[in-house]
Image (spheres, rainbow, N blue to C red):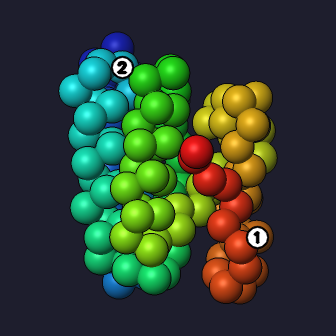
Amino acid sequence: MTAEDEQDTDLLELASDIDHGRVTVTGGVFTDLDARRLEHELIDAAGTQPGGTLAVDLSGVTFLPSRAIRSLVMAQRSASARGTTLRLLAAEGSLSRRMLRAVGFDVQDPIAADEDSQDGPPPWTAS
């Protein structure tokens, strides 16, 4: 793997699977532009799931600063206003799981979340 390949793996990638109510986030949230892209992607995707749940898989995130966490909070507020719940997912041991748990978010394992019913109470809220 070259230095260029390593840098490419850190670029923020957002993949929406609206039919399954899921957004997968990989790479790092390095800039304010990245944070805004994350926030807007989640808000747009949440708008397609009114009254439902949007799963946000952050397992592949390589850098998650406070500006990214703020984007998650803002997206959750917007989604909540539309009646949509954001469910944060991150694999055990991943950077994003450790960071989000450290600031008090409930984060589920993606495999377990797929097996669970999506009808329960919201796993986290932003006040």
**What residue is shown with label 2?**
30
Q: Residue at x 46, y 71 (%)?
A: 84
Q: Visible in this render: residue 21?
A: no
Measured from the top left, where is residue 73 in percent x and y?
A: 49, 42
Residue 118 visible to the viewer: yes
Seen at 26% across and 35% down, the residue is 36
Q: Is residue 53 above or below residue 2?
A: below
Which residue is tagged 1?
112
Q: At x 45% / y 74%, what residue is drawn?
A: 83
Where does residue 10 sit, x and y in percent of width and height?
38, 27
What is the quadrant of the C terminus in the image?
Answer: top right
Which quarter of the figure has residue 93?
A: top right
Q: Secondary structure at mark 2?
A: loop
Report the number of discs: 2
93 or 55: nearer the viewer: 55
Front residue of this view, candidates 2 and 50: 50
Q: Please tell me which residue is depicted at 29% across the width and 76% down the height of the picture.
A: 48
Residue 54, label in figure: none
